[in-house]
């Protein structure tokens, strides 16, 4: 398998097609794009069989990417439109797995005290939970209301417990039919930071890429479908440099100042080499945009509204 | 049983003795007092048999009250001394239940977004957890280190799930030997607000007094011993008024301006009457001192240090 | 002069009328009431001459009280209506002092780190300032836009500087035509806590009642009109007890259990006596409702929107 | 003058010496280095005459750089040592300008709501101010105590007022003898982020480099000496890329995979070219380390303690 270095099914599909010089869709992969408005775009990728799985290294399932431009300066109206888009996609994906009244547990991963990692806990604070009202005061809710509960389990470094162990215990005890997990991710490309929402129904691995699988949060580990909402909020310096190097060489080419070796560098993915150059100096920082507080605030509103309107 | 209207075993014992005109300790109840310094006092009450249980309506077990005066303006040195006192009491009580290596789960109840209710979650952020290090990187810890994990499960209004349901699931899954629960309480007397720490080993009922028992967090519900650390941070207006009324009548008596009826009022507990007078006007607010942010900060340090040094 | 123990001109007028058994308006005082909806009421009091000044101990000027019921649980729509009401009153009062383009400086008093005192600084963060844009990028604003600037000067305990000294320096230097000051107040009655907004155009004295006047923020000290927006967010225990005692005795009267002495107590204002009874025990706490975080959040939105829409 | 692209006098001196192949100190520039321990280093540069000024484009004055390694994971002891180092340097520099009782105003620049820009306001909250106590309660302070006041004036985008205008007003009104300004800076090199403290006595220009000088905070604008404490907390992507490109080419050289053109690239400063390549794609983000919350917390303690111990 290629080292795709991206979690996005749509990006992996592109890479695979380019590498194999394919012009048509890969067998086992279907996709469609939709432009909601000039700032919001949606791409839906569906992996339908084992061939698709093998090609891009992702299990059979749905993968939806919502791109939101200029989120940093988004006004109320644009935030609502983004929330509505998220809501529509989420409702579709939930409906393929459970019926209208199937109980849902919403899980916000992350650490409230680390700004770029605080999205999950903040969303949980804004989720409209109904489970306790339906159980203890059913007269106050409309008949047919779906049971929704929510939890922010903390992170391994603060709890000492793998998140999946916490969730396994809760799921076994309260028995929801589906879990929605919200997670702040590391971005694999400079342009995705805090502007992309990824929805998938095949679960997630917190801290993925570190090479452990014991912490997978998925139907395998929890026994019920897991819909993941992932938002890239941080990026490695090596990723920034790799992306920027291409732009820099492009500029040198435009100015006819490049050479064969540089052209070759641009063709290649130099991420691993750059990382190896930065690591010995402790320069491979994980960074986040200066405006992260505002970005998290806007994203929290989009994701919480998106979930509240869809469940 | 009397309506003791206090959770403190020591206060209940006093009320029972006074009401029954007893001069000696009640059969089934032992107690001792210690003055750590001019600002810190400890009282340890032990209920040893069924007679003691019946007398004051608390199950057999240990009940320790630490009073800390002037916490609002406490400096580093006094905070350390209070933490040390808590630590000593806590260690003794833990040692009566499990051995030195028995795994402990620390649970911080409360809502991080409601200042007077944020103590539990804030303490959890400062607990030194070891469970994950011992499991995955045992070479980095001394042999014999106790496994400690920690969780802040949120509140029913935010999660939709009874706290005990969340904990039951986690305890069943990770199997600790003892649970420590931290909880911000409603105070039953004006002078205890944010100046008392109560430790007991008989568990707690969140929102106690509302008349439900489904949510008890105790050995009954979890199957392992539960040590509770409770700190009063809020108080009902009716409690403030009842306590103040006594002081006011006392002053009238001192000035020879009282009368029989007032004297009788002072003898009685007028809490219930006052509450009934305030409720129709929506005047029975739950209140907290203006300095609650500082109080919570100081208490968080005391409780987190107290736990870290004792486990 | 009476010890009115309230800053509200409308309450002082009532007390004066009752004490002097007046049935008509006092010479030199005009007033009118308006009911915006079932939850929002406005009363406008105008002191027009020296006789009015003397009667209720307030300088000639406008005093407007907006009462908002059930703010704790207010939804978006009610918050907007309250903001609109504030906005209308504020616009009228501003228009009596300066013209449509007269520059305004908005000042948020208080301490961001003390929740019940954080309203002022939080409002400042949401004020739409225009002064710098008009000065440096005039092409980006409509012609005729009013210059608005904003500052949160901190509190004496944190800065070591009287607020009026800070403001005097700034006003002398940037020369606005009018100052709006936002201040969290101590409430003089239990029912006003976090449900009343007071607007006046005669300035304020931070920490008023402590008997100093050196810190007055008014046209006297700053040389330009000062519109004050005050919101009660805390209350003394002695005030709670005094108000509650009346309700309690009322209940005893209703149950025919009162007596002459109690009836007399109810007629009198016992605040000072109660305070003297509580002080020796350190029981006269300043308290705030448990839900203060949410109240401040809602009030911040009302006041910030109210100002943004009126200037 | 060179485009030094660094504010550090020590770095500019190095660049000038290298460019002019000088082996000795430049006339008009003196310097000395001190290694406090393995993690903390100090370099003191003094510009003594016009020749020194011209060489490195900085006015006559003192420039001290304190480097603190591994701040992210610093423990209490290391933080105290760093604070002590800052304190010593600061005391020396203050003593060269005013006498032991000369009043000082501490100014914390920045925005409390933007994490990487919140250092200044947070430090102000921890400064031990004495001015009000000396003025109103002199019996509570030792004779000879220095008057200290503190203010956090906000940022232009929130206040609409240039910071220097606010400070000018306050300084004219309360007349301190010296100002200390704390400012979070953009770093000019990847390794300085959140690990360097710069002290100088020649003032600062907020948002320096944008080409305006109207906002200079210095003896020129305020009329009294200005000691600046600057801490780099953010960095441009173009700076990260420029620094990283050198490391990357170095690695290629080590592996004998480089070529003449790359070697030349490494010799040159490509910052400007890289920036021009990134800007059209909106890729030149200003970023901050993921751990910025902890870094700011540690730095706040170092700077506040450093100031409190030196004034």
Image (cartoon, coloured by chain):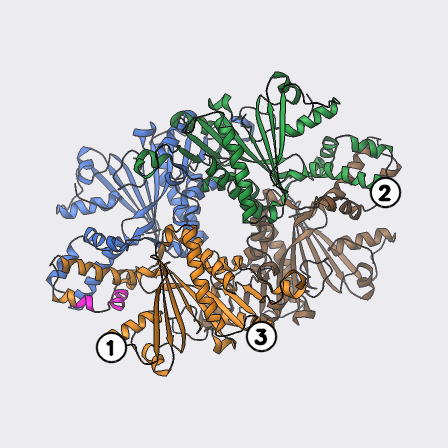
Chain colours: A blue, B green, C brown, D orange
What residue is at 45 percent from the left and 44 percent from the top?
A: A122
Q: Within the magenta stretch, is there residue D183?
A: no
Q: Nearer the viewer, mark 1 or mark 3?
A: 1
Q: Nearer the viewer, mark 3 or mark 2?
A: 2
Q: In the rendered view, tell whether residue D280 sits above or below residue B288.
A: below
D61 or C48, which is in the foreground? D61
Whole-number angstrom distance, CA of label 1 to CA of label 3: 45 Å
A146 or B110, which is in the foreground? B110
Quarter occupied by residue B24: top right
Report x, y in % for residue D264: 16, 68
Q: Could you say whether the residue bearing mark 1 is in a helix, strand or loop? A: loop
Quarter occupied by residue A183: top left
Q: In the rendered view, tell whether residue A119 sits above or below residue D79.
A: above
D147 or D205, which is in the foreground? D147
Q: Chain of mark 2?
A: B
Q: Chain of mark 3?
A: D
What residue is at 60 percent from the left and 43 percent from the top?
A: C72
**Labelled pair 1, 3 in contact (Cβ < 8 Å):** no
What residue is at 67 percent from the left and 26 percent from the top?
A: B13
Whole-number angstrom distance, CA of label 1 to CA of label 2: 90 Å
Magenta segment = D264-276
Query: Which residue is under mark 1?
Result: D22
Q: Residues within 10 Å of mark 2 (few under 14, many from 20)?
A: few
Tell me if A37 is positioned left or right of C149 in this view: left
| Image quadrant occupied by the N terminus of chain C | bottom right
Q: Residues within 10 Å of mark 1 (few under 14, many from 20)?
A: few
Query: Which residue is under mark 2?
Result: B255
Tell me if D99 is positioned left or right of B57 in this view: left
Q: Within the magenta stretch, is there residue D272?
A: yes
What residue is at 41 percent from the left and 50 percent from the top?
A: D75
Report the disc number at residue D172.
3
Q: Chain of mark 1?
A: D
């Amino acid at each position: 398998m290629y080292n795709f270095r991206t979690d996005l099914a749509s990006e992996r599909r592109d890479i695979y097609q380019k590498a194999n010089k394919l012009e048509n869709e890969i067998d086992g992969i279907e996709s469609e794009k939709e432009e909601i408005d000039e700032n919001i775009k949606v791409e839906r990728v569906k992996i339908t069989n084992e061939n698709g799985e093998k090609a891009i290294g992702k299990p059979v399932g749905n993968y939806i990417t919502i791109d939101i431009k200029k989120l940093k300066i988004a006004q109320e109206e644009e935030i609502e439109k983004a929330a509505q888009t998220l809501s529509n996609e989420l409702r579709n994906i939930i409906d393929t797995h459970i019926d209208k009244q199937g109980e849902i547990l919403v899980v916000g991963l992350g650490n409230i005290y680390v700004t770029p990692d605080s999205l999950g806990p903040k969303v949980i604070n804004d989720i409209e939970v109904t489970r306790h009202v339906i159980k203890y005061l059913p007269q106050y809710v409309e008949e047919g209301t779906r049971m929704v509960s929510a939890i922010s389990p903390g992170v391994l470094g603060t709890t000492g417990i793998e998140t999946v162990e916490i969730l396994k215990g809760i799921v076994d005890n309260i028995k929801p039919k589906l879990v929605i997990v919200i997670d702040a991710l590391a971005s694999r490309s400079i342009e995705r930071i805090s502007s992309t929402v990824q929805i998938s129904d095949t679960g997630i691995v917190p801290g993925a890429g570190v090479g452990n699988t014991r912490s997978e949060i998925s139907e395998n580990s929890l026994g019920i479908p897991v819909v993941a909402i992932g938002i890239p909020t941080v990026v490695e310096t090596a990723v920034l440099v790799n992306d920027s190097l291409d732009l820099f060489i492009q500029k040198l080419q435009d100015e006819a100042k490049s050479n064969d070796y540089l052209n070759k560098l641009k063709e290649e993915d130099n991420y691993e080499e750059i990382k190896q150059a930065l690591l010995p100096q402790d320069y491979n920082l994980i960074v986040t945009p200066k405006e992260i507080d505002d970005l998290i605030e806007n994203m929290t509103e989009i994701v919480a509204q998106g979930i509240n309107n869809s469940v």
